């Protein structure tokens, strides 16, 4: 079955919609010319030709809805488009031959068809159709000899007046078709450019993320030995300073903080090589909240709002990595809030998505700075207060899991960060992501 996203299939369906409009326009023109212009046209044969056009379009529309294999490739779709346009040239030629021959002002519609072919088809097919259109137009000069010139009962002056007015109407019809189609192509090109830009942006983020993962693994490897040494020395100091409670407490604090650093580095080394930052497990959604608050300084100022069934499991999502991303966002919110200010962590599980929202009531972010938030190592805080990776990693993880990330802020009113990822069914393929923890 042809994918609706294939450009050739889209062009074919768009051509069918244009043919409906063209056939109805032709029907209106024939009936109005017969009723108000005094022309004695062969209405029966003309209506029969238009009926053939409508029936053929109905058949082609039904065929296209079945998703034929021919439309599955751009080459096959172009062949179908070229064949339909060739049929249209033949039908137009018969219509013009029965209604004025080469003097019919609506012969400009040949040019509309050629313009559409130039946009839809490859150069070879376009030139072939242009040659076929010239041949069809040329046959109109034979129409009077074949007896196809209808009697009209009008003088030469009346016919010229009618011809000039018809040219005006034909110009309007042709212009409308060209404008509509060119605008459609322009919109399609703009959307395609936007998709390409987004793809390049995501590729750049993935490259930066891979570099960070490599850096995390290297840091974990290089720092493991000196941290072990510091831990051993701190333990010895604690034992030797047993008679000095305050000094022993300081040594114990050093040892605890070193152990915390070792756990973090170990997790970074593991996450750097694991899809999604962790192996797929059977953790409940509640672990996102637990991970977000684990070891967080200032967690007493965080108000948690849990909605939905957070007890159910999502075995194919890296929930702990999501929790660590949420913790980075909460930490940013706490740092941006005034002393004692409340930060809201809202986690909601719906039927198909997990939504994590972090909101503060701090100073907010200025419109000039907001577009840069999320760039790696970009931060507005004082040196040593952060590396500027929290938002970058949260955005990267959500995008790699097929979700979305948004950051909105109003200066003086606070900031809202939202991560939303789909809850993948247990039988689906797991999303792939590589993320070092913030």
Image (cartoon, rainbow, N blue to C red):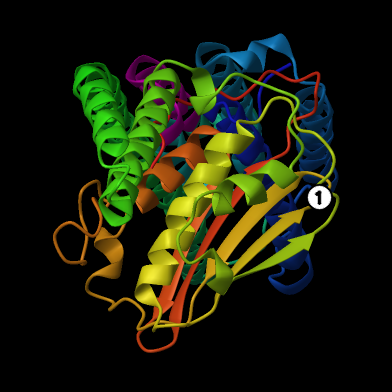
In the picture, measured across the screen, residue 313 lies left or right of residue 113, that is right
Question: Looking at the image, can residue 148 be seen?
Answer: no
Between 318 and 76, the one lying in front of the other is: 318
Tell me if 308 is positioned left or right of 433 in this view. Answer: right
Look at the image and tell me in which quarter the N terminus lies. top right
Query: Horizontally, is 281 left or right of 238 in the view?
Result: right
Front-lying residue, 243 or 104: 243
Task: Give the camera-side residue of 43 and 214.
Answer: 214
Seen in the picture, residue 361 relative to 267 is either above or below; the reply is below
Residue found at x 23% / y 19% = 218
Identify whether 179 is placed above or below 7.
below
Counting from the top left corner in percent of width and height, residue 288 is at 64, 45
Residue 313 drawn in magenta: no
SS at circle 1: helix
Residue 149 is situated, as x and y percent measured from the top left of the image, at 63, 42
Q: From what the image shows, is residue 176 above or below residue 108?
A: below
Label 1: few (<14), some (14–19) or many (≥20) C-alpha neighbours in 10 Å: some
What main secondary structure does the magenta stretch of the protein show? helix
Image location (x, y in percent) of residue 103: 48, 49
Of residues 87 and 30, the one drawn nearer to the viewer in this rendering: 87
| Residue 41 in sight in this render | yes
- The residue labelled by disc 1 is 43
Which span is picked out in magenta? 119-137
Residue at the spot x=32%, y=42% of the render?
242
Left or right placement of residue 329 versus residue 345 in this view: left
Quadrant including the C terminus:
top left
Image position, residue 157 (x, y; %): 47, 70
Q: Check residue 126 for magenta coloring.
A: yes
Against 236, residue 341 (above or below) is below
- Disc tally is 1
């Amino acid at each position: 079955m042809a994918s609706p996203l294939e450009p050739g299939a889209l062009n074919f369906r768009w051509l069918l919609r244009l043919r409906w409009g063209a056939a109805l326009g032709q029907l209106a023109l024939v009936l109005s010319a017969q009723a108000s212009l005094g022309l004695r046209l062969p209405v029966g044969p003309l209506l029969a030709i238009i009926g053939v056009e409508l029936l053929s379009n109905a058949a082609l529309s039904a065929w296209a809805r079945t998703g034929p294999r021919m439309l599955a490739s751009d080459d096959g779709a172009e062949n179908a488009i070229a064949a339909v346009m060739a049929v249209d040239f033949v039908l137009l030629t018969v219509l013009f031959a029965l209604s004025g021959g080469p003097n019919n002002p609506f012969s400009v519609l040949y040019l509309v068809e050629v313009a559409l072919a130039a946009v839809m088809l490859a150069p070879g097919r376009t030139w072939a159709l242009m040659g076929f259109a010239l041949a069809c137009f040329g046959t109109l000069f034979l129409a009077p000899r074949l007896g196809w010139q209808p009697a009209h009962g009008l003088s030469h002056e009346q016919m010229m007046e009618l011809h000039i007015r018809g040219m005006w109407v034909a110009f309007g019809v042709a212009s409308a078709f060209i404008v509509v189609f060119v605008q459609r192509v322009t919109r399609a090109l703009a959307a395609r450019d936007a998709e390409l830009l987004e793809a390049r942006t995501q590729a750049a983020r993935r490259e930066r993320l891979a570099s960070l993962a490599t850096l995390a693994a290297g840091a974990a490897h290089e720092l493991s030995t000196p941290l072990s040494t510091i831990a051993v020395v701190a333990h010895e100091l604690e034992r030797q300073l047993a008679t000095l409670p305050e000094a022993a407490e300081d040594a114990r604090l050093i040892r605890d903080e070193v152990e915390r650093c070792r756990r973090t580095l170990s997790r970074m080394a593991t996450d750097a090589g694991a899809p999604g930052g962790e192996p797929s497990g059977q953790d409940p959604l509640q672990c996102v909240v637990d991970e977000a608050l684990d070891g967080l300084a200032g967690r007493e100022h965080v108000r948690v709002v849990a909605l939905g069934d957070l007890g159910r499991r999502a075995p194919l999502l890296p929930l702990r990595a999501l929790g660590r991303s949420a913790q980075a966002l909460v930490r940013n919110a706490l740092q941006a809030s005034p002393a004692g200010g409340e930060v809201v962590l809202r986690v909601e599980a719906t039927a198909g998505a997990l939504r994590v929202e972090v909101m503060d009531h701090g100073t907010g972010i200025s419109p000039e700075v907001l577009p840069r938030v999320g760039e790696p190592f970009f931060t507005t805080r004082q040196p040593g207060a952060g590396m500027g990776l929290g938002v970058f990693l949260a955005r990267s993880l959500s995008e790699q899991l097929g979700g979305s990330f948004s950051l909105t802020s109003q200066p003086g009113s606070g900031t809202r960060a939202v991560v939303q990822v789909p809850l993948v069914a247990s039988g689906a393929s797991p999303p792939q992501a590589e993320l070092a923890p913030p």
